[in-house]
Image (spheres, grey):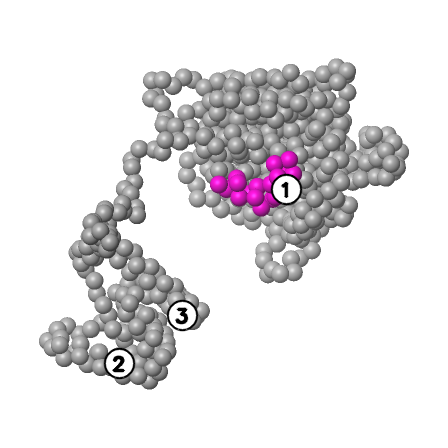
Amino acid sequence: NTQNKMMNAVAAVAVSAARRRPLHQSHHAPISFTSLTSAAHQRQQHRERHDNGPAFQQVVRTRMDNSASSAAGAPAPPTFSSYDFPERNEAPVITRTRAIDVASSRRASDSSDNINTSSSTGASAIVPPHSKPISSAPPPAILSAPPSARLSTPATEITTLPNGVRVGSMETPSPVSAVGVLLDFGSRHERLRNALPDDSAVSTAGVNHLLELLAFQSSLPSASLSSTRLRSRLDNLGAATFANSSREQMMYCVDVLRPNAVPAFDLLAEVVKCPEVAEEEVEEMKKVMEFQLMDVVPQILLGEGLQMAAYGKLAESNGDGDGDGDDDTLQQLGRPHFCTAEALPFLSARSVHFFKEQNLLHNPHGVVVSGSGIEHDALVELAMRHFGDMTAANPNEPPPSPPPHDNPHTLPSTYTGGQYRLPTPLHSLYPDKPQYTHVALAFEAPLGWHSPHLVPLCVLQTLLGGGSSFSAGGPGKGMYSKLYREVLNRYSWVESAEAFSSFHAESGLWGISGSCRPDKAGELTKAMVREFVELSRYYVTEEELQRAKNMLKCNVLTQLESRLVLFEDIGRQILTYGRREDAESMCGKIDAVTKEDIIEVVRMAIGTMRPTMGVVGVDISKVPMIEDVEKMLSAESMGTHSVGGSGGGGRGGGKVEKKSWFS
């Protein structure tokens, strides 16, 4: 106890001195521990200083004189700089304590505290100590890991409830469970105007963005919990909560100690099904969204623009055909994922309730309960308790079609290609910050998640690799990937160059994005074109291909070691395919990819479809138009090299004979 008091006093004096220290002196050496006095002495100094005024200086001088006379012949006391005590004109009195003295004092204090003598009886009673030694054994509520001999190969178990809700899980020897719900709706199902039976209309544009922010932040009337009490109860359970929305799916997740998985899932189910979503809660989150819109990073603007250009408006209506003059011509995959400034004022609590009524509450086939680190039977019981009563809007209708279109409100989108160009204003707060032009060039991945070329496209993305101009290097950083070797390491003015892909139920995109100084944006675009054409004209080397396949398998397997990634992978695969493919099968498909598969994917993209280009930056004048990019691709593929060099000479992969699409 004495040591604790002394350490508390030391910390308090250190904080106080640090606050008094001038800001321009904050980089100097911190206060020395030996210059701090005991708690009692500090309080005495404080009283003398403020109560006695000048007497304080006389007391200090007297103590220093006495100390000097009694320590004749002793070494000179240490000196102190003005940074240690900036408000003092003389050195303070120093009290030094040895570790052995502290230990002896603590033992004496413990003995006196543990013995309480009764004044009435004179008998001595032993009082238990305030703190107990920490045991090496885990708490009884936490399950110990079983011996390795008792462990079996984990397998994914899937159960379908009578109403169509699917439950998938994998048991792992972990004291922590990740449980949650994945839902078959996303921003593609939003509409700017939805007609209601009372001839009014409600907007759902931006609802998924709003739902992500409202997750675990809204009151639960069914459980008599306010939003504050809900967060407090989750904190008491030690739960970490997550919510994520995409264009096609919504995810709610709780990561919690295994003994607390049941009460945590009870709260999560209420959050998913019946949150209150009051107007004041919506208005609060709309302010958050407004602040987010003030400073959107260029990469997000570029990604949104690519989707809008790739799945542009169609001449014929692809909406509900009601002719109400709203966004009927916008394809679902071409709608913004994040709420726009134009749609924000029309969001309300009514928008949220209408969207959930339309896409969730009467769509049990679009609900997947997923878990990792939890027994499957226990998860099925929880799913039945909370989601077993869900019914379809029309129970007499046959079950929905198998994936990819479980949601009846999902309308297939058609790839159109095109360009998106967005000049951005100079940042008002950071006008001297370096400005870059961001460019992306992409092609369609037909059939998206269900494409036979899905795995070769993933290998190709890993083979291209890339990243930013600065990297610490090291194993697995992709420093030998194609874009690093042939773009980032070749052109010093390139800030970033990276391969990307995004897949959906019926289509997808894959390509290269990069950034550089505005005056070099045209050259960056030509470098991207050369990479695509080189892939279509030359086989990749066996070394490149094997390195990419090894890296992709490594990424897949290491990611699945994460409990949260495993939970998400189980849920999304069941929602997308109706089943889950294990890691062994996945690695087998990766190993089966050949260099012929890579060149076929690239040739099919360049030769049969229009590219999609996105450009974002303060100055985008140097970036060629999409028509010029198409001419570059055609000229390069024909071998005229109008954009400078083949880029593939001496690769050793061998030139491929031209196919009919070159002519």
Residue 647 in view of the camera: no
**Residue pushed farthest front?**
120
Label 3 close to label 1 by CB (< 8 Å):
no
Return the mark for residue 59.
Answer: 2
Q: What amino acid type should be assigned to the residue bearing mark 3?
A: Arg
- How packed is label 2: few (under 14 Cα within 10 Å), some, or many (20 or more)? some
Label 3 close to label 2 by CB (< 8 Å):
no
Residue 319 in view of the camera: yes
Q: Earlier in the sequence, mark 2 or mark 1?
A: 2
Q: Is residue 151 left or right of residue 608?
A: left
Q: What segment carries the magenta color?
A: 220-236
Locate residue 259, reporting x and y percent: 45, 30
Question: Residue, x 28% and y 63% (percent of image)?
Answer: 33
Q: Secondary structure at mark 3?
A: loop
- How packed is label 1: few (under 14 Cα within 10 Å), some, or many (20 or more)? many
Q: Where 59 falls versus 120 (above or below)?
A: below
Label 3 belongs to which residue? 21
Q: Is residue 305 left or right of residue 321?
A: left
> Viewer-proximal residue, 503 or 264?
264
Distance between the alpha carbons at the discs numbered 3 and 1: 45 Å
Q: Secondary structure at mark 1?
A: loop
Q: What amino acid type should be assigned to the residue bearing mark 2?
A: Val
Label 1 belongs to which residue? 219
Question: Residue, x 77% and y 16% (percent of image)?
Answer: 397
